[in-house]
Image (tube, coloured by chain):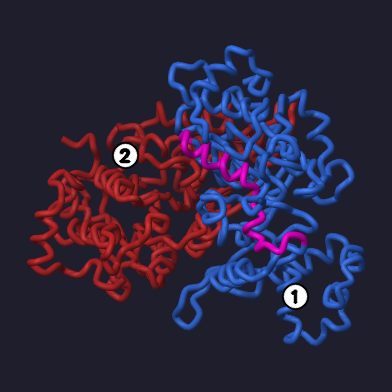
Chain colours: A blue, B red
Amino acid sequence: MLGCNRPQTNKETAKIEADKDTVLLPSWSEGTSKHSIINFVTNTTKEGNSDFVPVADRIACFDNDGCLWAEQPMYFQLAFAIDQIKAMAPQHPEWKTKQPFKALLEGDMKTVMAGGEKALLQIVMTTHSGMTTDEFDKTVKDWMATATHPKTGKHYNEMVYQPMVELLNYLRANGYKTFIVSGGGVDFMRPWAELAYGIPPYQVVGSSGKVKYEVVDGKPVLQKLPEINFIDDKEGKPVGIHQYIGKRPVFTAGNSDGDYAMLQYTSASTAPHFGMIIHHTDSVREYAYDRKSSIGHLEKGLDDAAKYNWLIVDMKTDWKKIFSFEK
Amino acid sequence: MLGCNRPQTNKETAKIEADKDTVLLPSWSEGTSKHSIINFVTNTTKEGNSDFVPVADRIACFDNDGCLWAEQPMYFQLAFAIDQIKAMAPQHPEWKTKQPFKALLEGDMKTVMAGGEKALLQIVMTTHSGMTTDEFDKTVKDWMATATHPKTGKHYNEMVYQPMVELLNYLRANGYKTFIVSGGGVDFMRPWAELAYGIPPYQVVGSSGKVKYEVVDGKPVLQKLPEINFIDDKEGKPVGIHQYIGKRPVFTAGNSDGDYAMLQYTSASTAPHFGMIIHHTDSVREYAYDRKSSIGHLEKGLDDAAKYNWLIVDMKTDWKKIFSFEK
């Protein structure tokens, strides 16, 4: 469907204003962004409308980092991995002289980052394998309950975007199934996503390592192996949608070029569809970054938004509130 | 939970009889099997009961071949692949002299089978890759609408077990999410599973090939590649449950030793749980096979059923009706 985020006519706007419950998406400012979302959801859920989508096909996919929760000053999963390395260090005296662990333990993130993907992969593999899935699940939950964000001092699972939580609820209230489709690790997201977003584990698609089924001392466990299973990023996102969801989304939201293929795949549907990009424009309440940032790099998405009719959400003006803890 | 399929006391039975709607599981004969299922579902869904399971954790996993639909005289997906080879043959004159295609086209299944796993993999790869996911989806739907079972003359999607469809509905009516966890191909099951079982694509876990995202003539497509992605069988089933569902099942049903690990994994839970095995005992209405069959081989499951307290469902006596088309 084209025109899903075109400026509305006065008549349309008046109708939506009259129809909608005044508490719909309360953290969204009145304006084109909010209205185009409500317009699309209304059109796709009203029987008889030419854009009507049956409940079974109402699939909505959301990136996580920078789309549902913050991702600065570093991906939260990396902050988790660093904290795990620190916690594991006493059992690994060899790390005192071995990179990238040495630099990491000395707080020298510049040297860690200079190690590139290889160094990051080593850190992730070391902290995300060598235990059972149950043990890892507990480690994530414990970390989430204690670790805090360096800028806000809030727990990481409080760093979720209130307007997006409202959007997830609004879509579900209208018969949409909401999925996370993230480059982040699925075992890292599932332990807290249900509480934070109302999204159950089986609706979380993400990157993963291989696991192995074993019976240890008569007890069946799943061991996390130091081997990549699937990378759910860039061209991997439509692949992940196919492999894990099996239906093309009707509604897709992202914030970086890692979401480009997923948005493009959604927009190629012959059925009604809606694509949106969260643009980080608020350096005061959150962070402002796009074309020049390595985290959440957004360039192609901005360049092609008009071509694909993607809604660009301006966090600074479109969101009255970003985090629920804001005054 | 132990004791979920123990013979009930008179008092318990009387209570269930009084409580239950008389139309519950109508194709199941009155007896221990039916009553133990109803007992378990009642106990896990009644708030205040010591075996109560919150709605969010009510995960039920079902094998497909031989558990939800028939699998004799050959896996239906193999029948599909054979029909596809025949349909593709005019474009492949080289198959007239190349095994396993030559034997298959000549109807010589003995020679095909003598080629073992390698021959079967060749047949599956040839028919399950080299097209887009949308094209494959259409091929499966077309085949399902036309091909018929050699014994009953019914379409394959009519060969579903009526008592299991009732069980799926009953579980869902009690807040359970129902999943397929099958060794069969996920792209083969999803096009018809929603209609046949009420199970949407994103609740179907199965074996899969790799897919690749490409933009062809400006149109984004997913190409099916001749490369295995995941085999959802035996020890792969608990792995698949973890990767795709992310929660340990409370209720699990299978029929062959391919389901043993999944049943064992479920039974190791500290939460209430129920495991059942469909035993093919009816040579008249369906097929009778277990320890000596290569299709649906069941040996370890029968040997260890008592140890794990798995319910053995005797198709001949426990099911009043097997297929909905029976008179």
Residues B163 and B82: in front is B163
- Is residue B108 something that shows in the picture? no
Residues A139 and A233: in front is A139
Task: Name the spot of residue B317 as percent of width and height, x first.
Answer: 16, 54
Q: Which residue is drawn at 30% across and 70% down?
A: B305
Prevailing SS of the magenta stretch: helix
Residue at label 1?
A: A85
- Secondary structure at badge 2 equals loop
The chain holding disc 2 is B
Disc marking residue B159: 2
Q: How crowded is mark 1: few (under 14 residues within 10 Å), some or many (20 or more)?
A: many
Query: Which amino acid type is marked by label 1?
Result: Ile
Can residue A159 be found in the magenta stretch?
A: yes
* Residues shaded magenta: A151-175
Q: Which residue is drawn at 34% across and 50% down?
A: B175
Q: How crowded is mark 2: few (under 14 residues within 10 Å), some or many (20 or more)?
A: many
Disc marking residue A207: none
The chain holding disc 1 is A
Task: Name the spot of residue A108 as percent of width and height, x first.
Answer: 89, 71
Query: Which amino acid type is marked by label 2?
Result: Met
